[in-house]
Amino acid sequence: MSDTPPDRLCVDPDSKFHDETVLARGVGIRFKGEEKTNVEEYCVSEGWVRLAVGNRVDRRGKALTVKLQGPVEPYFQDA
C-alpha cells in the first residue's frame, strides 16, 4: 500500500469511492490548515470536503452534509 492517501475517499459503503482497507488504516484530514474529524468525503484534486452536519440524517438514514471548498490535505494517522 502506498504512503499517500487516495485523491478521493468516502466513508459511505454505497459510494464507488469507498475503500475499507484505506479507512481501516486511518485517514486524517486537514482542511484549510485545520484538523477535521467529521469528514464524510473528500477530493484533493477538486479541492473540497463534505462535512457531517451534527447528528442529522436524511430520510434514507445517511448523514446530512455540507460541501466546502478549499485546500485538502489527507494523511495516514499511523504514519
Image: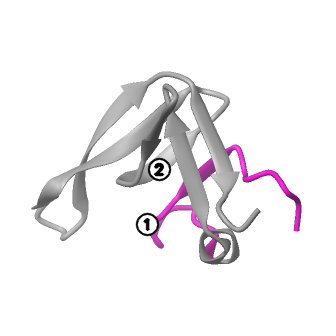
Q: Is residue 68 something that shows in the picture?
A: yes
Residue 17 appears in view: no
SS at badge 1: loop
Judge whether 18 appears above or below 38 on screen: below
Question: What kind of secondary structure does the magenta stretch mostly adopt?
Answer: loop
Residue appearing at x 63%, y 34% in the figure? 44
- Name the mark on residue 12: 1
Q: Which residue is mark 2?
A: 41
On screen, residue 73 above or below 62:
above
Image coordinates of residue 52 in percent, x first then y, are 27, 51
Residue 46 picture location, percent across and down: 59, 26
Q: Between disc 1 and disc 2, whose residue precedes?
A: 1
Please state the extent of the stretch shown in magenta in the rendering: 1-20
What residue is shown at x 71% (from left), y 68% (from top)?
Answer: 78
- Tag 1 and tag 2, C-beta contact below 8 Å: yes
Instruction: Check disc 2 and report its element: helix, strand or loop.
Output: strand
Magenta residue check for 50: no
